Image (tube, rainbow, N blue to C red):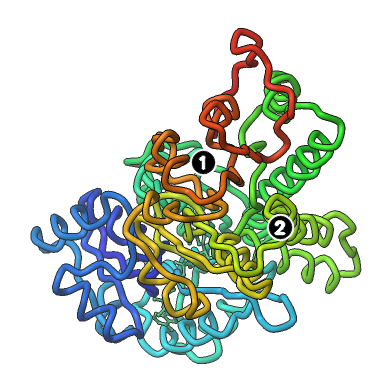
Amino acid sequence: MRNIAVIGCGYVGLVTGTCFAELGNAVSCIDTDAGKIRGLRAGKMPFYEPGLLELVLRNQHSGRLRFETSVADGVADAEFVFIAVGTPMAQNGEADLRFVRQAAMELARCVPPGAVVVNKSTVPVETGDLVASILREHGPDGMQLSVVSNPEFLREGCAISDFMSPDRIVLGISDARALEKMKELYAPLNAPLVITDVRTAEMIKYTANAFLAMKISFINEIANLCERVDADVKDVVAGAGADRRIGTAFLNPGLGFGGSCFPKDVSALTHIAEKYGVPSRILPAVLLANKYQIERTLDKVDSALGGVSGKLVGLLGLAFKPNTDDIRESPALALAQLLCERGALIAAHDPEAMENARTTLPPSVKLVEDAYEAANDADAMIVATDWNEYKQLDFSIVRKIMRGNTVVDARNIYDPRTVSKHGLNYIGVGRSARLPAPSLDAAIVDV
Ligand code: NAD
């Protein structure tokens, strides 16, 4: 059993702290948001993440997991202090390190001797040096200091299994003592370790996210071209992805990427490249292509309806992806905003994100109880987030209750044949207008 403190109870901090407690450690999770800590102490989750509530309650009950508002209370006796605060996008697109600096300053005043300070937040190159210099300057004289970079790769929606069974654990470390301690801490996960220096570890995280975002923008462009040349992108992905050098993961065209990571991390890496005098040509294009995808979807609805002004659109999905209530940078919300600006009326549904979305959406957007209510009387229906519960809609009912017949499958979750046979006008992303015989379908591994 190790004593661990985690600063920041967001998606990463809370999952990390809870999972370490589940592995038998004593963990204190700290957050400046007193309301969040009050809620967590009372067993109320600040966000939706499948399976997390049960894990929090179990570990709280066993006394291995506690919640604090004060860094000093939380880190007393800690052998490891994880910094997992937010690193949002600043006005100019850089990573805003305000919370990291603040956490490091608070930590400097109370860091226990010999504790390993671990940076889990996604941060630009040299932030490990920044944290170390804050601790050195404001901490006790002659303190033994180890600052480790241990970026997190969990995905919202499957964060617990991602933490417990990671593809790899990246450890950016400059001293042998901290390395041995970190190896021991992560030993129960039995995962491959990538051990490197701190700056390389910081680069690894941005490289991974930027590459995944690039794959999405790339396949969206290919899908758009498929529409023009009457090819089917699903089959293109199956054929190209069968090459082991390519694979099919993250080659699922749609409405573009969103969330709290890809947009800000691509933007931050663009700025890092600029700052170091190696400007990127690819990264700005990734963001541009992503923005265009939303406009393109809007144009598809617009032209199918002969203008969206005054038309009722049923919008399925508001979260940036399924299995989360996170709406940060959600393309679904951006699409809703644009539709409203063009005068559309919207009835929107999301299984988890409606409460979060309510204050962000234009007030004219009506939030409804389920997909069928969203489709009711609608001139068009759009699937903006690929929640499982939208995958098996009864299209005979949908056809009856809709006023119009346009179904825009912006996440390619339906078989065009299934939708079209009910007299609906199916519009997917990069799907061929010619519907192939079922026997000719290429096998697709969905990701
Ligand atoms: P978040 O915004 O959900 O949570 C951050 C939390 O830190 C908030 O609750 C905030 O109140 C708290 N905080 C801020 N300053 C603090 C301080 N000085 N002391 C204590 N608490 C403080 O952020 P998140 O989504 O958990 O992301 C955290 C970091 O991890 C970011 O750098 C992000 O890029 C990275 N990351 C996120 C994900 C993800 O899926 N969300 C995945 C991998 C990495």
* Quadrant of the drawing holding the C terminus: top right
Task: Check disc 1 and report the residue beneath it.
Answer: 168
Camera-side residue of 32 and 285: 285
- Quick one: label 1, few (<14), some, or many (20+) residues within 10 Å? some
The residue at label 1 has a CB less than 8 Å from ligand 1: no
Whether residue 72 is situated above or below residue 346 in the rendered picture: below
* Quadrant of the drawing holding the N terminus: bottom left
Task: Check disc 2 and report the residue beneath it.
Answer: 302
Q: Are marks 1 and 2 in contact (CB under 8 Å)?
A: no
Residue shown at 15%/59% (left/top)?
57
- Distance of mark 1 from mark 2, alpha carbons? 45 Å
| Sequence-wise first label, 1 or 2 | 1
Measured as percent of width and height from the top left, residue 444 is found at: 59, 22
Measured as percent of width and height from the top left, residue 85 is found at: 46, 74
Residue 306 falls in image quadrant: bottom right
Measured as percent of width and height from the top left, residue 56 is found at: 21, 59
Residue 30 falls in image quadrant: bottom left
At label 1, the amino acid type is Arg
Say what secondary structure mark 2 lies in.
helix
Say what secondary structure mark 1 lies in.
loop
Residue shown at 66%/40% (left/top)?
427
Q: Is residue 346 left or right of residue 47?
A: right
- Given this view, does label 1 or label 2 mark the residue nearer the observer? 2
At label 2, the amino acid type is Asp
